[in-house]
Amino acid sequence: MKEILGFRNKLSLIFIALVVIIVLYSGQTSGEGSPLPAEEWRISIRDFEFTALASTGKGEVYAGSTENYIRKLNDNGDLIWIYTEAEGVISSLAADEDGNIISGSSAGIARKLNTSGEKLWSYDLHWSAIETVSADREGNFYTGSRDNAVRKLNADGHRLWSSHLHTSTVQALVTAEPDKIFSGSNDRTLRKIDGDGKEVWKYDVYWGSLKAAAADDQGNVFTGSRDNLVRKIDSEGTRQWSFDGHRSTIKTLAVDKEGFIYSGDSNGKIFKLSPRGEKIWSFEPHSSAVNDIVVDENKNIFTAGQDGVLIKFSQ
């Protein structure tokens, strides 16, 4: 009888341990043979949030915040420098091929910094807040703003053109192919724009405003929106697939060099999808919205949270 009771006690302990594991890993799922990424480090800022990220591809990462600061961190998460002279919340960041950084802010100012954190120029002829910025391989920069416009700036900060195709705030920009840019807006449209600022095509089958965009090396674009869907649109403007695993607004997207897609939502959850739109894994590293996500050349993942936490994951 004692042996039976002892066996039952062991079973009870095993059951309790399994329950604890399930509770700890609730919301964290991965496909067979696809382990979740490993956390390498995290930093946090009290009473503020990280809002924007950009990667140099060399292990370094830039991070913007609601403090109106821009930080540059090395591969170990150590601070290299901090820029404190920006006006307004840093809403978006993008890095060029040389590692220079452009920032957009709620004050409507685009600013270019070199790799040492020194300001090279600023452009302030926006009529409202900048929501998104992007860079192309030729060193040009693009801004999307609340005045419904997309602007192209050259490497010296001179405006080349402005495009007013959208009827509401431009929330997402991404460059792809030579002289092509995709813009997403609160007007529920995705537009492909050529190097002269002219519309190539428009895709408008959305049930909510666009919040994020990313592109792969084949010219396909991926969008995230308030209808909780990730969509793949090919270079001709045709939808290839939709992924409906999110349960809240998709705020940010990234694509790695192998074509895998990473999406973060307003519940603090991130997903990794295959190029065919199949779920690889998902988990919830943040206690509130994922504001931005970037993936570097080594497939390290950086996430910036509304909870004031910046995390690096390896995979």
Image (spheres, rainbow, N blue to C red):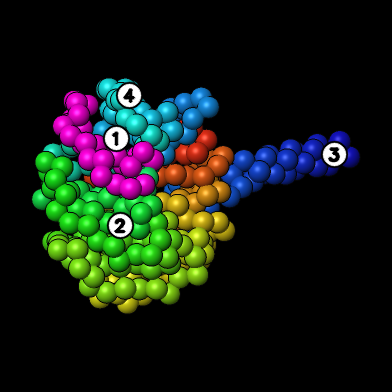
Q: Quadrant of residue 195?
A: bottom left
> Of tags 2 and 4, which is closer to the observer?
2
Q: Amino acid at mark 2?
A: Ala
- On screen, residue 145 above or below 198: above
Q: Are marks 1 and 2 in contact (CB under 8 Å)?
A: no
Q: Is residue 292 visible?
A: yes
CA distance separating discs 2 and 4: 27 Å
Disc 2/disc 3 C-alpha distance (Å)? 73 Å
Number of numbered labels in the structure image? 4
The residue that appears at 38% across and 34% down in the rendered structure is 88
Asked if the residues shown at circle 4 and circle 1 are in contact, with their CB atoms under 8 angstroms apart, the answer is no
Tag 3 secondary structure: helix
Taking the image as shown, residue 11 lies to the left or right of residue 86, namely: right
Query: Split into 4 quadrants, where in the image is the C terminus?
Result: top left
Q: Outermost residue toward the right?
A: 1
Mark 3 residue crowding within 10 angstroms, few (<14) / some (14–19) / many (20+): few
> Which tag, 2 or 4, sits closer to the chain's start?
4
Question: Label 4 amino acid?
Answer: Thr
Residue assigned mark 4: 84
